[in-house]
Amino acid sequence: MSGIAEVARLAGVSKSTASRALTGGGYVSDGTRQRVADAAASLGYVPSTSAVSLATGRTRTIALIVPKVNRWYFGAIVEGVERTLIPLGYDVTLYVAEPGSRDRESLYSTYLARKRFDGIIAVALEPDDADLERLANIGKPVVSIGNALSGVPTLGLDNISITRIITQHLIALGHTDIAFVGSTPPTDAPAKDVDERSIGYRNAMNDNGLAVRIRNVPSTLTITDAYAAAASFLADAASRPTGVVAACDEVAIGVIIAARRMGISVPTELSVVGIDGHDYAEMFSLTTVEQFPLAQGIAATRILVSMIEGTGEAPRRTEAETRLVVRASTAPPRSA
């Protein structure tokens, strides 16, 4: 493989000039810069990231922190970030660290402390998370996807409004006995987005005189746990709700699977609505509020790069796009 010396020789310049032209580490005339770039291209030479970093003080690498990658939502964000960075000439380093895990502690105490990146995209941090202060102390630009964080540009959802809308959708169909499934189990750490969705549900029930019917069913945000929770509260026909507002689509799908296995018709006997726009939502004919995590990853990346390169002022808070999609999982209750 050709080195910088061969590039300099072909371009007719010194090695230091060739290095400055390729790394942007100093002044080089436009004509010389183009001549060096043409020589590098003809030889197949690519500057090493360490050389560029030494010359410019920048790594052209973004750190992306997610709690999981085996969930549809987080995987789509990773795809959006990567898809945006590559054409801009940036790399991405992915860190997967669940809250409270040893991996997460190592991430902050070792890997992020090395600062081998120009900026950070953090996904699903909690506002009271101590990690937020640790991120701020690193001294690099940070963009958040998810909960609103103090002092950090954030791309997120109005969870209260969204859940109020889907609860109102069931009420407008004639449902009065509606449960919220997916509230955070008492043994788990609080999750602000789930709490906000529960508030939106309660607000809609209260506004329609249905406060006595409010029912929260704890479950983690997985199909399997939601299935187990639904199998329990759907078993008693006398107390069974006619409608379910799920904290997310995966919870909604777990409820639908449990209902079908118990011989409960969806939506004739049980209407179910979710939030997210999961890849499986259409397969289960699920009424849901779609969000677009791939687009969120793209938007957050563009904001972060503009902060790094000083080409734009980052907004404090940006509402992510959503839309209500009504499918065949909701209908008027049989009694109506």
Image (cartoon, rainbow, N blue to C red):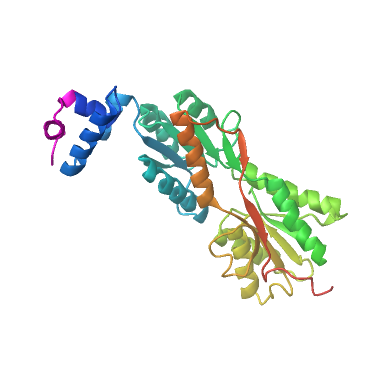
Q: Is residue 95 above or below residue 21?
A: below
Q: Quadrant of residue 287?
A: bottom right
Depth order, front residue of 56/116: 56
Confirm whether residue 28 shows in the render: yes
**Where is residue 273 shown, x and y percent of the image?**
68, 62
Residue bounds of the magenta highlight: 1-16
Indicate whether residue 33 is drawn in magenta. Answer: no
Q: Residue at x 79, y 71 (%)?
A: 333
Classified by dominant secondary structure, the portion drawn in magenta counts as helix
Confirm whether residue 148 shows in the render: no
**Where is residue 30 shown, x and y percent of the image?**
29, 29
Placement of the C terminus among the 4 image quadrants: bottom right
Q: How many marks?
A: 0
Q: Quadrant of residue 158?
A: top right
Q: Furthest residue to the front?
A: 31
- Is 101 left or right of 175, judged from the image as shown? left
Q: Quadrant of residue 274?
A: bottom right
**Where is residue 89 shown, x and y percent of the image?**
35, 40
**Where is residue 296 shown, x and y percent of the image?**
53, 47
Placement of the N terminus among the 4 image quadrants: top left
- Is 228 left or right of 206, judged from the image as shown? left
Indicate whether residue 8 is drawn in magenta. Answer: yes
Depth order, front residue of 3/147: 3
- Is 177 left or right of 181, judged from the image as shown? right
Depth order, front residue of 41/181: 41
